[in-house]
Amino acid sequence: MDLRLLGIDNTPLFHTLQHMMEAAGEDSDKSVNAPSRNYVRDAKAMAATPADVKEYPNSYVFVVDMPGLKSGDIKVQVEEDNVLLISGERKREEEKEGAKFIRMERRVGKFMRKFSLPENANTDAISAVCQDGVLTVTVQKLPPPEPKKPKTIEVKVA
């Protein structure tokens, strides 16, 4: 319904309501359709961190290239619901006097990868080794459950 037909389009109340409705419409479009900054940051960090995942008979192995990083720059964690999180930050090299970058192609900034671990992953037996710029995280598997043996019931004679 067009409120101008009722002749109240010149009132301050009408202008205030109209302004509020227009502002709410603009804000809702942005908040509903646009991803949050944290989501965008995490998505970029995950996309820029390739990894290989291998399954062995007794373990799962995650291999991630980490050239030039120290062990203090890398964090390996297990979050709730068996999620393995590998994260860290590659810091920008400080410029020394008299030197300037002509080209900077190596990635700097935060990186992160999340992996859902299977139910048979032993989260209490995880090791991480970074050697020659390659991080290897090994998650041992839980031993398979022993098959239940049939229970024998002694039959008594009455």
Image: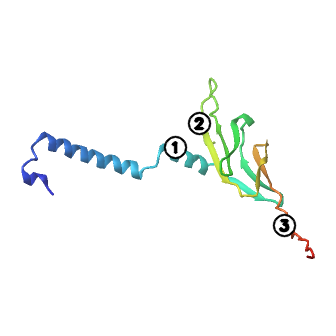
Quadrant in which residue 154 is drawn: bottom right
Quadrant in which residue 102 is drawn: top right
| First in residue order: circle 1 vs circle 3 | 1
Per the image, the residue denoted by label 2 is 102
State the image coordinates of residue 37 (x, y, percent, origin top left).
48, 43
Per the image, the residue denoted by label 1 is 38
Identify the residue shown where x is 40% and y is 51%. 32
Per the image, the residue denoted by label 3 is 148
Camera-side mark, 2 or 1: 1
User: Callout 3: 10 Å neighbours few (<14), some, many (20+)?
Assistant: few
Q: Secondary structure at mark 2?
A: loop
Distance from disc 1 to disc 3, alpha carbons, whole Å, reads 48 Å
Left or right: 96 as drawn, with respect to 6? right
Identify the residue shown where x is 9% and y is 47%. 8
Q: Kindly identify the amino acid type of the residue bearing the numbered disc 2.
A: Ile
Q: Is residue 154 above or below residue 146?
A: below
Q: Nearer the viewer, residue 156 or 22?
A: 156
User: Callout 1: 10 Å neighbours few (<14), some, many (20+)?
Assistant: few
Camera-side mark, 1 or 3: 3
Q: Secondary structure at mark 1?
A: helix
State the image coordinates of residue 120 (x, y, percent, origin top left).
76, 58
Q: Nearer the viewer, residue 90 or 88?
A: 88
| First in residue order: circle 2 vs circle 1 | 1
Left or right: 32 as drawn, with respect to 6? right
Q: Is residue 2 above or below residue 93?
A: below
Q: Residue furthest left?
A: 7
